[in-house]
Amino acid sequence: TNISILKTLADSFKPSQLNLTNSIIENSSLNNFLSTQDKNSLKSEQDFNYFITVILLKQYELHITKYHQGFDLFTMRADNASFIVNSFVEFSNLPEGTKGINSSYILEYIANNDNLKNNNSIIEILSRINSLTN
């Protein structure tokens, strides 16, 4: 099967900064990809939901590992991170007028999505997070 570029980029994403914007900038292949794509066309890709979810889940993992808490993703909406966070807001059905979203919310989103919660890559990241928080 053809592994999509979105899946490859998500799987290779390694956040290093508290702010998602800076984590993406430091991942040059991801940043370059997002800077050169028609972002609306990405939304119809099969792996788009996985792509957004894994990037945010890995960012949350960094938050928990280094800072022992989640952080508001709305404060990280700059450059290409803006597309990631806004896309997540679109398909997570947050109430209209939501003023912020903690990076930990990704856990609840995954728990309510059968495709995501049964995905081996996601299960692996979740188990790393669970080992930190228990």
Image (cartoon, helix red, strand yellow):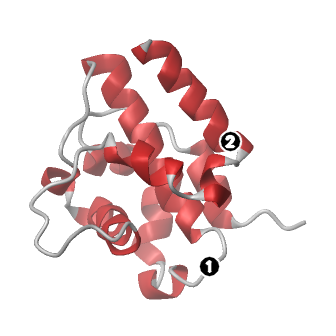
The residue that label 2 is drawn on is: 121
Task: Using the image as rendered, state which of residue 107 and residue 26 is in the foreground.
Answer: 107
Image quadrant where residue 45 sits: bottom right
Query: In the rendering, at what x and y percent does residue 50 appear?
Result: 58, 59
Task: Using the image as rendered, state which of residue 65 and residue 5 is in the foreground.
Answer: 65
Q: Amino acid at mark 2?
A: Ser
Residues under labels 2 and 1: Cα distance?
A: 18 Å
Tell me the element at label 2: helix
Asked whether the viewer can see residue 28, the reply is no
Q: Is residue 67 above or below residue 47?
A: above
Image quadrant where residue 125 sits: top right
Tell me the element at label 1: loop
2 or 1: tag closer to the N-terminus: 1
Residue positioned 46% across, 63% down in the render: 32
Residue positioned 59% across, 25% down in the render: 127
Query: In the rendering, at what x and y percent does residue 10 appear?
Result: 57, 52
The residue that label 1 is drawn on is: 45
Q: Is residue 14 above or below residue 79?
A: above
Q: Is residue 98 above or below residue 43?
A: above
Residue positioned 56% across, 58% down in the render: 113
Query: In the rendering, at what x and y percent does residue 132 appear?
Result: 45, 14
Q: Are marks 2 and 1 in contact (CB under 8 Å)?
A: no
Residue positioned 16% across, 75% down in the render: 96
